[in-house]
Image (cartoon, helix red, strand yellow):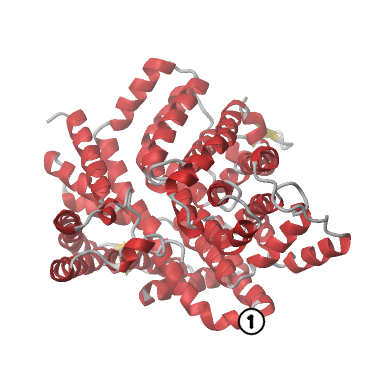
Amino acid sequence: MVLCGISIAGFTLSVFCDVVTRELGRPWLWLQLVTTGFFAWGVFIGMAAATRRIDHLNLVEITKRLRGAKRSLLEITNRLVILLVGLAMLVFGTQNCLNDLGSFRAPSLIPLATYTASVPIAGALIVLFAIEQIVNGWRHGFEGPEDADDFAGIAK
Amino acid sequence: MSNGAILLLMTALFLGFGYMGVPVAFALMAGVLVACGLTPISMQSMVGQMFHGIDSEILLAVPFFLLVGELMTSADVTNRMIRLAQTMVGHLRGGLAQVVTLFSMFFAGISGSSTADVAVLSRTVAPEMTREGYDRAFTSALIACASTMANLIPPSIMAVVYGATGNVSIGGLFLAGIVPGVLIGIGLMIYSHLFGPAGLRKPRASLCEFADASRASLLPLMIPLIIMGGILTGWFTPTEAGMVASVYILVVLVPLLARGHIRHLPRDFVYTGLLYSIPLALVAAASAFGWMLAYLRGPDIVAGWIELVAGHDGRIIMFLLVVLFIVIGDFMDAVPAIIIFMPIVIKLNELGDINSLHMGVVLITTLVFGLITPPYGLSLLVASKFVGVAFTRAMLASLPIYVVFLATIAFTVLAPSVVLYLPKLFLPESVGCFKNPSGTGYICPK
């Protein structure tokens, strides 16, 4: 969560400096790369954080209406789908990142891998959080007080 | 396996997982990864597509407009605008209902997020409406309907996403959204006046009270001017305009109007950091889904069906797309819907020789309607939760208000000259006009 805050503060500052230096007639072109870097890392780390906080958007909240074994079965299946997608992001994202070590972004020639590394790292975190939720849910059940307030995370 | 069968399987998996409760972004990716196993496309390239989907400078505007809304809401600066709305329309029949609509129009010019609007109104005006005897179901339905204007009146996050994926002028979409946004506002005010609860009649505010409220709201109401002024004069891109508005709030509004809020600013940044990643994670996954859809020739299949019914008639094509997007908007969020179906929309634009900006504003207006229709009416869900009424009751109360939205959509389709008047006036290139070689004025397509 804190990393998400740092990311948005970072790219607010870098876009601000970008506009100011451009208006002064001395643009720092590398600032755009810093901006997109903060942005991409913020999106993927935020994706992982939202997975842990169960803040992602859902089509329906069907699981919260269920209880007992049915609920556990569905919750575990859902976490397994998330885990498999996270695993794909980790494995294939790592392959992409390794390939991108040889690609560079103009004008400052930063390796593209510094951006694309956000995908496998988010994937690794998603896998960890999915496993954490499955284990915790298995031990203590999936029902919790948040069931009554499922939109609290969306809009405070 | 044929392309059509893979397409159906991929879509069925997405909807199946989605309705089982898997978050939308993961349900989309699960469908794509299974489709990869049945096609020569590698999973590596689809995971790469997730990154490329968000690797766009234009999409940076999304977090800035969310940050503006969050800062304004949490610093409680919005109370001043509610007070201004009260002095303007509080004395009318159903005064507080009119205040909800008018405030939403003001707030829509500042924030691009309907959810932020719902949160503000549910915390401030809704309890007062309950005290005055308004039915809670009506209150939540009206708040949800009014909040949809945030996605039409600029700045609009849907317009940013549509412009970024469809290569359409975002400034043009912002301007084109004003007419349907204001029409919905006027429609809601007429509906509340004629059919809504009467509420308590209050005396008309004096000129002094109105002047005081206007003065107090002057600084917050500068934000729409900064955003649209910066874009229209060519000083800023939409992204930079969002940043300038955020900096204006941080440097001017918070120190002058809500000094005590300064210590809470880190919390606002952390919260917005998480908030913006949720729709953009959807953008990442939907862009992979949209890519696979295009690879499987989904746009050709759908365009073929639509061509069969509509031929090359642009207006009928638009109406068929409106029907399609009303159905889509009932079942999924607008952001992935825009990205997934963009290849189909582009194909149909060519088929019916439709102006891409006109199509954009029609589809955004249609998707906005999806925010209040079941089962995935996000604004209505959130409003009913906050106001404390069953979703079904809120939905029943909103049913008659659907007429306002359907009439606005029909007007947007049938009156392109009115809807595109502002973009044509201020950003002629956005509607396909080009400079006259003789040097005076623009030549525009009919």
Q: Looking at numbered disc 1 in the image, what kind of residue is underneath it?
A: Arg
Is disc 1 placed on a helix, strand or loop? helix
Task: Answer with left or right where residue B234 lies relative to residue A109.
Answer: right
Using the rendered view, name the quadrant where residue A142 is placed: bottom left
Q: Is residue A107 visible?
A: no
Q: Residue at x 51, y 74 (%)?
A: A13
- Given residues B231 and A105, the one toward you in this image is B231
Left or right, A43 with reference to B421? left
Q: Is residue B420 above or below residue B75?
A: above
Task: Identify the image quadrant of residue A85.
Answer: bottom left
Residue B45 % position (x, y): 21, 50
Residue, disc 1: B259
Q: Quadrant of residue A131?
A: bottom left
B312 vs A24, nearest the viewer: B312
Q: Position of residue B19 (x, y in %)?
A: 27, 46
Q: Position of residue B318 (x, y in %)?
A: 49, 27
Q: How many marks?
A: 1
Q: Residue at image x 12%, y 39%?
A: B38
Q: Is residue B93 visible?
A: yes
Q: Residues within 10 Å of mark 1 (few under 14, many from 20)?
A: few
Q: Quadrant of the N terminus of chain A?
A: bottom left
Where residue B116 sits in the image (x, y, percent)? 52, 60
> Pointer 1 indicates a residue of which chain?
B
Residue occupying image coordinates x 44% and y 70%? B271
